[in-house]
Amino acid sequence: MATDGNKAQIKVTQIGSPIGRRHDQRETLIGLGLNKINRSRVLEDTPSVRGMVDKVHHLVKVEPAS
């Protein structure tokens, strides 16, 4: 993790559909700001965001933000 004002960030891209998945997985994608395939969001790399990403790891691709 970076210190001071330079927070580490990750880019999360949705690569899978929530159709046929559990309702909480769909809600987690919405919480991450994703709702369509190939949409991306740059998010702060925090334990809560990492936990959400881990819950839907099969539906998203994670990479460092540039």
Image (cartoon, grey):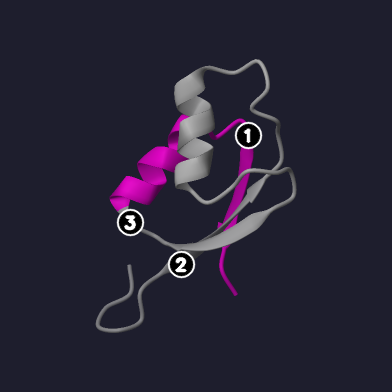
State left or right for residue 53 relative to residue 7.
right
Amino acid, disc 1: Leu
Residue 60 horizontal/vertical position (percent): 62, 41
Crowding around mark 1 (Cα neighbors within 10 Å: few <14, some 14 to 19, many 20+) is some
In three-dimensional space, the C-alpha distance between marks 1 and 3, rounded to whole angstroms, equals: 19 Å
**Secondary structure category for the residue under label 2:** strand
Amino acid, disc 2: Gln
Crowding around mark 2 (Cα neighbors within 10 Å: few <14, some 14 to 19, many 20+) is some
State left or right for residue 60 relative to residue 23.
right
Crowding around mark 3 (Cα neighbors within 10 Å: few <14, some 14 to 19, many 20+) is few
Mark with earlier residue (1, 3): 3
Q: Which residue is mark 2?
A: 9
Question: Which region of the structure is painted magenta?
Answer: 47-66
Q: Which residue is mark 3?
A: 46
Amino acid, disc 3: Thr
Mark with earlier residue (2, 1): 2
In the displayed structure, 66 sits above or below 17; it is below
Q: Which residue is mark 1?
A: 59
**Of 21 and 66, the residue lying toward us:** 21
